[in-house]
């Protein structure tokens, strides 16, 4: 930790010429950041005669990752949405040169006086409805934003609306192909179903967060969502993808009635429709819900592979390759079994 | 063996959760230990049921292959399905059972892909057998609930 403090202090001096006496305190690693090493810290320095104190977050590339992602995707998303007033931390610096901290990283504002949302422990009952409404309406704002207007259209891979599903499915199928440690018959059956039953294209492309769910946002005791985090899977695509992922039963103790464990499904989706300007297409949503379980499986399979191969021995990866994989396999089997009985397979 | 392996592992888990994890100075270390405790708890459960789960799954898949052998017209696939239906587990080591399980699962993927294109009542019945197997096997492998152990985030 001392080494990181020293290195980061040198980096901040480099990025802000003229500041002196940079000191890093309260540096601690945040648990669970298997796709990035995440550190909480406070930086203090003198700027001219003035003492400055700033709570910061450092996100450093790990040796191996839960998902191989481009840090610039995440940083660009923060940069695009911060000026719009969407609750995201202010992005400060991105550094691709490993000479500073051994690996690439970026630095952003740390949101204070907030709680980390959890898929195991929902917000307090007195504020859960408010948090839930904001959770879904903020997702609606993301979907409703014009990617070109906010400067993301040129920074994210282009895709035609009718090919959104194919690109995403191909990507995650390839992850399974490359990383599976043993045969995955349920995932394979789901992939065949998804290919045979493609969804209708979205009316227009949206920014898709890619990992919008409980666990990836902060809220305060007044019931306000204060930060939407973890944008590393952000891409252009069909907005149903984010709804389906956020409503995946894994994030709500398998409840489909209250997606993400907060407000009822109908209210959640109505909230999203009001802020996004889109109308949810049930056929598209069903496709993306099944896709979400395949995507989940791919993430967990990939995590297990990282651990098994020894690329990254973070125990969270072992857990990811074990527990969520079992849950998603079971949920997918139940869902597809029901569909098969409806003679849809 | 007494004390049994799962009792020992459960005891280690309890010590980690009650004594060691709470005394850590950093939140990160505490949560890492909690995660380890959760995995140990599942290992304890696995110790008792791992061989049985795999043995039962392999037997069930062989039964499906037996059921399929009259339906499959493709000669190559039919040969594989018939051979798999007759195969047996010759060792109850987890490694051997896993290897057989993996092989049978691969063949099941091939069979299911084939049957999905067969539009006959027999084909539909076989598909239902395969889906029932998936539902049952995933239920049998049901994980220990992590909520009793720790709040975990798979990614951040």
Image (spheres, rainbow, N blue to C red):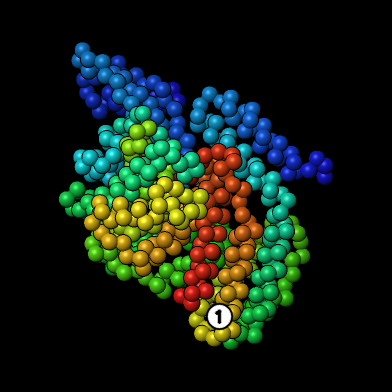
Q: Nearer the viewer, residue B130 or A52?
A: B130
Residue farthest to the left? A149
B57 vs A305: above or below: below
Residue A46 falls left or right of residue A173: left
The residue most toward the right is B2
Whether residue A95 appears in this view of the structure is no
Task: Report x, y in % for residue A95.
Answer: 30, 36
Q: Is residue A254 left or right of residue B8?
A: left
Specify whether A94 is left or right of B66. Answer: left
* Picture mark count: 1
Callout 1 environment at 10 Å: few (<14), some (14 to 19), or many (20+)?
some
Residue at x-position 59% and y-position 64%: B135
Image mark 1: chain: B
Q: Is residue A140 above or below residue A342?
A: above
Percent of width and height locating residue A231: 34, 46
Mark 1: secondary structure:
helix
Point 42% across, 69% down: residue: A194
Which residue in the protein does label 1 denote?
Answer: B124
The quarter in which the N terminus of chain A is drawn is top left
Image x and y of residue A119, in percent: 47, 44
């Amino acid at each position: 930790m001392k080494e990181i403090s020293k290195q980061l202090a040198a980096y901040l001096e480099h990025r802000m010429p003229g500041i002196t006496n940079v000191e890093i305190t309260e540096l601690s690693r945040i648990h669970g950041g298997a796709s990035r090493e995440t550190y909480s810290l406070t930086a203090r320095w003198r700027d001219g005669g003035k003492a400055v104190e700033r709570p910061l977050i450092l996100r450093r590339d790990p040796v191996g990752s839960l998902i191989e992602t481009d840090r610039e995707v995440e940083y660009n998303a923060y940069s695009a949405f911060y000026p719009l007033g969407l609750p995201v931390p202010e992005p400060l610096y991105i550094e691709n040169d490993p000479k500073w901290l051994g690996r690439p990283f970026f630095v952003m504002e740390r949101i204070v006086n907030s709680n980390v949302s959890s898929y195991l422990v929902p917000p307090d009952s007195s504020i859960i409805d408010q948090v839930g409404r904001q959770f879904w309406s903020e997702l609606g704002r993301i979907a409703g934003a014009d990617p070109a207007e906010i400067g993301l259209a040129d920074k994210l891979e282009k895709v035609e609306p009718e090919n959104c599903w194919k690109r995403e499915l191909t990507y995650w199928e390839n992850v399974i192909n490359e990383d599976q440690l043993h045969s995955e018959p349920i995932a394979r059956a789901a992939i065949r179903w998804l290919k045979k039953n493609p969804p209708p294209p979205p009316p227009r492309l949206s920014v898709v967060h890619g990992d919008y769910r409980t666990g990836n946002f902060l809220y305060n005791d007044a019931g306000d969502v204060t930060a939407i985090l973890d944008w590393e899977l952000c891409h252009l695509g069909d907005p149903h993808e984010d709804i389906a992922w956020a409503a995946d039963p894994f994030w709500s103790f398998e409840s489909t009635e209250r997606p993400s464990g907060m407000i009822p499904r109908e209210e959640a989706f109505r909230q999203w429709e009001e802020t996004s300007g889109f109308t949810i297409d049930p056929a598209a949503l069903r496709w993306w819900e099944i896709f979400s379980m395949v995507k989940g499986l791919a993430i967990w399979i990939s995590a297990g592979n990282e651990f098994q191969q020894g690329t990254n021995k973070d125990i969270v990866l072992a857990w990811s390759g074990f527990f969520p994989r079992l849950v998603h396999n079971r949920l997918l089997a139940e869902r597809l079994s029901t569909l098969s009985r409806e003679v849809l397979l | 063996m007494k004390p049994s392996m799962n009792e020992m592992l459960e005891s280690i888990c309890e010590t980690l959760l009650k004594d060691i994890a709470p005394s850590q100075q950093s939140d990160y270390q505490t949560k890492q230990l909690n995660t380890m405790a959760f995995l140990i708890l599942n290992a304890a459960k696995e110790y008792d049921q791992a061989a049985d789960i795999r043995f039962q799954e392999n037997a069930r898949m062989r039964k499906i292959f037996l059921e399929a052998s009259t339906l499959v017209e493709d000669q190559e696939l039919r040969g594989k399905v018939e051979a798999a239906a007759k195969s047996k587990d010759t060792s109850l080591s987890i490694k051997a059972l896993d290897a057989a399980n993996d092989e049978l699962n691969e063949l099941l993927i091939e069979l299911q892909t084939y049957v999905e294109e067969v539009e006959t009542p027999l084909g539909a019945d076989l598909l239902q057998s395969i889906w029932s197997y998936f539902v049952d096997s995933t239920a049998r492998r049901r994980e220990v609930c992590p909520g009793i152990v720790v709040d975990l985030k798979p990614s951040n």
